[in-house]
Image (cartoon, coloured by chain):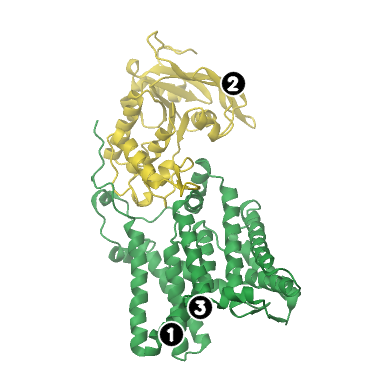
Chain colours: A yellow, B green
């Protein structure tokens, strides 16, 4: 099972997953999966429930270390035992719950865990709220986004705006690769479109994206390549332009396409 | 692409909702004060005003600590018992010849130690704060009684009674201490990393952890801080009346928690306001004072306070839209992008 879409014009490989496996008891959730993601590439990860998508990305995000196999980031093998390790290595994860604190405002959420500080009377550290706000506005406007009411708790924001805040958090960390788990779920059509735009913009800036989604329409709108998993194995890795929805569905359900693999 | 989201009014105004709430409470206090003065002019004298502030002083101090605890989604029922335990032990030591300054240091150390234990049980043994501090409430009261059941301690050195009874330019020292404590608390709460982490833990503990906040350590620190504010409150109490006994501070947790809740800090954690807490404590103190002047029995004062707390929490819940029907009337009209918000409440 080799990638059949590789060309020489590909940019640098940001992420390489080599022969990764993870079992839970007797169940092989991820079974000998190898995969690579290029700079600025949008890779869609699809498959039925229980196919192993979540386990695979959890390993990449450092949330659940694998039993065996290797993860290389920018060519360097990394041991990702905690989300912190992954974050340091340049991998950001957008959880389904987005990981926002509802009661904090936008800059506080964006900067939580890596606050900017200043010195009160040159000795006592305190938060630099002005600078955090300015940086937040800068980050958001870099993506053509302006949020009203930056100082209100984010609980009042819409689903798409919350996505934006969560993504800003990741951008702040200079991520190389963002993992998004069902980013368009629970969003309205218009909001979903905005998030799609945002993902495209990130990719144009050289940030790689792995998207898990059940929505094949989004997959074809967004992805450069599509990785299909079934029963813990990678059953297909296809170029989105060179395949059809029918083939992808066959891969998801039967584990094989018409061309044979 | 152009994913501009709605309005351009992104910068330049304060957090209006909290400002609104603080002003609202302040307005209630002013209106009530005018009402009380109209009923009985004795209420409005400067001496009585200072009396109200002095009576509120130790509640303010301890309630500032409690604001941190409640904002972290915790609660501390043990403050009254802690005051009793800390003051009887310290009083005994100071009467036994301990240097008064060291005695005060000892009080803070003991308060911090108690807070450390509570925080340890809450953060690492995962005992819910309500249960953990209920245990400490009983246990510390018991220890205070073991130490000096039926005994009335009195007779502190003048250097200490100055803290409770002295004044600077006519302003009682306890009042100055309480406002200094509140100012420090407000700075810590609003302007420091610690304050932000406390709010983050109370708002969404898991998100805070994933963001790299050392949640357990911060939680322990919250209770340590609470313990030190409790010690300061106890210091004011015992030096003001130059005495203490094992039953001091009984039911004090009700006053303290009430002040915090009336002030607008969310019982569900995640957000709070020190200014509101101070106003809440002043409102309670003022009500008590007015009821005393009016000659109302102490027991009825408790009933009135209970009603105030219920009303305050009810208003707060309505504002937070936990009661959807009435929320419609109380919510300020959403503007701009808020129009497409789902109307359901906070998700925790």
Q: Are marks 2 and 3 in contact (CB under 8 Å)?
A: no
Q: Residue at x 49, y 65 (%)?
A: B180
Q: Looking at the image, which is closer to me, A96 or A178?
A: A178
Q: Residues within 10 Å of mark 2 (few under 14, many from 20)?
A: some
Q: Is residue B57 visible?
A: yes
Mark count: 3
What's the CA distance linking mark 1 and mark 3?
Answer: 12 Å
The x and y percentages for residue A261 are 46, 13
Q: Residues within 10 Å of mark 1 (few under 14, many from 20)?
A: many
Element type at marker 1?
Answer: helix
Q: Residue B131 vs residue A92: left or right?
A: right
The x and y percentages for residue A251 are 43, 21
Query: In this figure, which residue is indicated by the disc labeled 1?
Result: B290
The chain ID associated with circle 2 is A
* Above or below, A13 relative to A65: above
Q: Residue at x 44, y 71 (%)?
A: B280
> Which mark's residue is nearer the viewer, 2 or 3?
3
Query: In this figure, which residue is indicated by the disc labeled 3?
Result: B55
Dividing the picture into quarters, in which one does residue A208 lie?
top left
The x and y percentages for residue B146 are 75, 74
Query: In this figure, which residue is indicated by the disc labeled 2?
Result: A69
Q: Residue A89 vs residue B332: left or right?
A: right
Q: Are marks 2 and 1 on the same chain?
A: no
Element type at marker 2?
Answer: strand
The x and y percentages for residue A12 are 43, 15
* Above or below, A145 relative to B245: above
The chain ID associated with circle 3 is B
């Amino acid at each position: 099972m080799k990638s059949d879409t590789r060309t020489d014009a590909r940019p640098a490989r940001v992420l390489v997953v080599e022969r990764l496996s993870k079992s839970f008891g007797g169940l092989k959730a991820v079974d000998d999966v190898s995969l690579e993601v290029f700079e600025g590439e949008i890779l869609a990860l699809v498959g039925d429930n229980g196919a192993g998508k979540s386990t695979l990305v959890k390993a990449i995000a450092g949330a659940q270390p694998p039993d065996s196999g290797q993860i290389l980031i920018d060519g360097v093998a990394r041991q990702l035992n905690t989300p912190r390790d992954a974050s340091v290595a340049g991998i950001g994860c957008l959880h389904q719950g987005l990981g926002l604190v509802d009661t904090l405002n936008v800059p506080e959420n964006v900067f939580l865990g890596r606050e900017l500080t200043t010195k009160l009377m040159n000795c006592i550290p305190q938060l630099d709220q002005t600078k955090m706000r300015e940086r937040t506005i800068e980050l958001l406007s870099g993506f053509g986004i302006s949020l009203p009411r930056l100082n209100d708790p984010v609980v009042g924001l819409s689903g798409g705006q919350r996505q934006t805040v969560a993504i800003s958090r990741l951008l702040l960390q200079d991520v190389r690769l963002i993992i998004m788990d069902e980013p368009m779920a629970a969003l309205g059509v218009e909001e979903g479109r905005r998030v799609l735009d945002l993902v495209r913009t990130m990719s144009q800036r050289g940030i790689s994206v792995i998207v898990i989604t059940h929505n094949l329409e989004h997959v074809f709108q967004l992805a450069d390549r599509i990785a299909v998993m079934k029963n813990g194995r990678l059953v297909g890795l296809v170029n989105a332009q060179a395949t059809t929805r029918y083939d992808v569905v066959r891969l998801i359900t039967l584990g094989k396409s018409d061309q044979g693999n | 692409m152009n994913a501009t989201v709605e309005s351009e009014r992104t910068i330049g105004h304060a957090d209006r909702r909290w400002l609104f709430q603080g002003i609202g409470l302040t307005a209630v206090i002013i209106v009530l004060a005018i009402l009380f003065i109209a009923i009985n002019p004795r209420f409005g004298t400067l001496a009585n005003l200072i009396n109200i502030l002095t009576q509120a002083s130790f509640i303010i101090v301890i309630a500032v600590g409690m604001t941190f605890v409640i904002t972290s989604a915790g609660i501390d029922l043990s403050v009254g018992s802690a005051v009793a335990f800390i003051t009887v032990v310290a009083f005994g030591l100071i009467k036994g010849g301990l240097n008064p300054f060291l005695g005060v240091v000892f009080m803070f150390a003991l308060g911090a130690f108690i807070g450390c234990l509570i925080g340890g049980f809450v953060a690492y043994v995962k005992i819910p704060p309500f249960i953990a501090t209920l245990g400490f409430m009983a246990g510390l009261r018991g220890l205070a009684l073991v130490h000096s059941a039926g005994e009335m301690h009195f007779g502190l050195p003048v250097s200490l009674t100055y803290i409770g009874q002295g004044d600077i330019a006519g302003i009682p020292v306890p009042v100055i201490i309480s406002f200094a404590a509140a100012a420090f608390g407000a700075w810590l709460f609003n302007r420091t990393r610690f304050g932000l982490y406390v709010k983050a833990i109370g708002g969404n503990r898991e998100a805070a952890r994933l963001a790299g906040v050392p949640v357990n350590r911060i939680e322990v620190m919250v209770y340590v801080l609470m313990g030190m504010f409790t010690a300061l409150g106890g210091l004011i109490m015992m030096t003001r009346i130059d005495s203490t006994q094992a039953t001091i501070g009984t039911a004090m947790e009700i006053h303290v928690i009430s002040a915090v809740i009336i002030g607008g800090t969310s019982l569900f954690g995640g957000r709070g306001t020190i200014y509101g807490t101070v106003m809440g404590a002043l409102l309670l103190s003022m009500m008590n004072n007015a009821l005393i002047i009016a000659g109302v029995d102490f027991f009825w004062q408790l009933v009135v306070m209970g009603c105030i707390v219920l009303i305050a929490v009810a208003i707060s819940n309505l504002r937070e839209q936990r009661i959807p029907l009435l929320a419609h009337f109380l919510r300020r009209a959403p503007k701009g992008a808020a129009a497409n918000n789902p109307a359901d409440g906070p998700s925790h």
